[in-house]
Amino acid sequence: MPVHPKMTNEERYERGLQTLQKMAGEEDVRMIEGMGEFHPDFGHMMIAFGFGDIYSRSAFDLKQREVITLTSLITQGATEQLPFHLHAALNVGMSPEEILELVMHCAAYAGFPKACGALTVVKRVFDERNIVPNTK
């Protein structure tokens, strides 16, 4: 759904919170809400803009958006944000094998150091979720 210019900030925030809940577990939702408790303006912006305006648009589904986000984070070397988005990607239907293929593909464009850093985070998330990918 596109953002309607007459939506209030509260409507954008509520839509963002609903999208976030589809993507993330309760622990991740609480973590993001915790950022808002520490810095309310930033927390509101992250939910209203990031999840209410961007992730809620209809041109891509949540799985496609996570492919884009993971690729962007890996190519930036922004591994601190990877765990949240890896969990979200798995929650919205991305398979472990697709995630591993994405990391491999990024190695060709972003370089092996960034892909290796990402793979370390992927392994940690897979271990947390008891995921053993089919790599044959």
Image: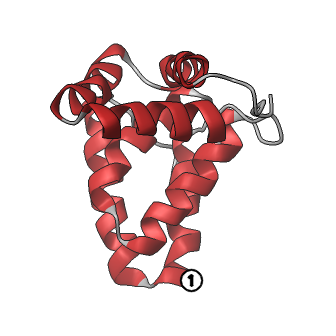
Q: Which residue is mark 1?
A: 109
**Front residue of 59 and 104:** 59
Secondary structure under the numbered disc 1 in the rendered image: helix
Left or right: where 32 falls relative to 104:
left
- Which quadrant would the C terminus be assigned to in this image? bottom right
Left or right: where 67 falls relative to 30:
right
> Who's the residue at 33% across and 44% down the image?
83
Left or right: where 80 falls relative to 75:
left
> Who's the residue at 62% across and 22% down the image?
8
Three-letter code for the amino acid on which mark 1 is drawn: Tyr
Image location of residue 57, percent across then percent down: 74, 36
Q: Where 114 sits versus 30, above or below?
A: below
Residue 136 seen in the figure: no
Q: Where 105 sits versus 95, above or below?
A: below
Image location of residue 21, percent across then percent down: 49, 17
**Front residue of 87 and 101:** 87
Can you tell which quarter of the image residue 86 is in?
top left
Residue 81 seen in the figure: yes
**Front residue of 77 and 31:** 31
